[in-house]
Amino acid sequence: MAFRSHLMQQFAAAARQQSRPPLALAPLYGDGGSTASSQRRRETTASPSPPRRGPSTATAIPPPPTAAAAACHVGLSPRYTVQVSPRHSPAGNSTSSRSSEKQGALGITRSLSSLTATSLAAAAEEGEATATNNNNGESMPAPPSTPELQQSFQNLLKTRRTVSNLVQHPESSAHLNAAISRAVQCAVEAPNHKRTEPYTFTRLIAPSAATEALADVCYHVSVRRMREKQKGSEKTLLAEAERKRDRWRNIPAFLVAAVGGMPDQVPSDSHASHQKERSEYMYAELPFVPPQTELQLENYAATCAATQNVLLSLHAEELGSKWATGPVIRTKAFRDVVQLRNDELVVGLIMLGVPKRVPRSPKRRRKLMGDVLKDL
């Protein structure tokens, strides 16, 4: 779409210099699939523009270490070597999957094997040329729409797995910290009715005092539950609880997803005045208090959607993750370690790190066509 006047050219050039372009020009910036339109935009940028009226408050979000494409970022070359189960890849992509398994790469690397570095570099350049802005005025690249990138993004969604075998890589600590930051940047772009932004993500990188305290909570909760269920002798259950604590100590990082504005999640503990009683209370499961209003339910759903964005972002960076719930997160001791408010409900505890093994594809219980997807 060509500009019809010299005045329109100056108007568009001035809009690109500001933190938020006019809505009337949104279609011009969204046309990222045409090389000719991209060339015209670059030529228009060279046109003289009037002086800016004030300093821009836009802050550029740092790009991920791999080439940027769709869904915040997409990784191309494998970062870590892992074992890939033969059934991990989606159906219909066996040739590509066998090649990636030999390289020890994740499914996301397999899904992007058809893309060259040149095409991704061109896509990143096109995305920068069609920059838009988010609600906070931060510069965000608009990903170009091509069949290759569309298929790669869909493969990224289909190859994410829950990974329980997480290991600490010698070079992964700094990468984990930065990857979590980028994942939360993707999280806040999830659907959120009324834009309440109810979620809070708390990051814990091991080894630290916080992750050690988290492992201790796991130990005490395990001991208490096994005693209640009378699972074996005292020596046996203490050994099993110690094994779980060691496993939690070896998890490279945690991310706690919580939603605020919920009903009070912590009842009064005034009855636990004695030290032993208080110890029992700290590691006992608190009563579950679900959302009670429509807005609280929508906020909970928004936090779940944001958490899924986190998992997908981590998967794109070749990191494994596990969205855990269970009795540990429903204790007063856990809430104290994470420093949660009484009105914050824990949506999940995300464990993340370098995957030691990639689980095989699960067998679906329901058919897609006619069962999961119905036509009317």
Image (spheres, helix red, strand yellow):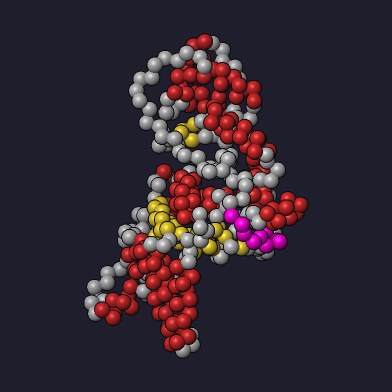
Q: For residue 336, say whether it is visible.
A: yes
Horizontal arrangement in the rendering, residue 295 relative to residue 155 (left or right) = left
Say if 18 sits above or below 175 in the image: above
Q: For residue 364, say whether it is visible.
A: no
Splitting the image into 4 quarters, where does residue 212 fall? bottom left
Which of 253/370 is in front? 253
Q: Position of residue 347 (x, y in %)?
A: 44, 59
Q: Residue furthest top?
A: 6
Q: Quadrant of the N terminus?
A: top right
Which of 376/142 is in front? 142
For image coordinates 69% across by 46% down, the residue present is: 113
Q: Residue furthest front?
A: 170
Residue 88 drawn in magenta: yes
For image coordinates 58% across by 44% down, the residue present is: 74
Most common secondary structure along the magenta stretch: loop
Q: Position of residue 189 (x, y in %)?
A: 48, 44
Q: Which residues are magenta?
A: 80-92
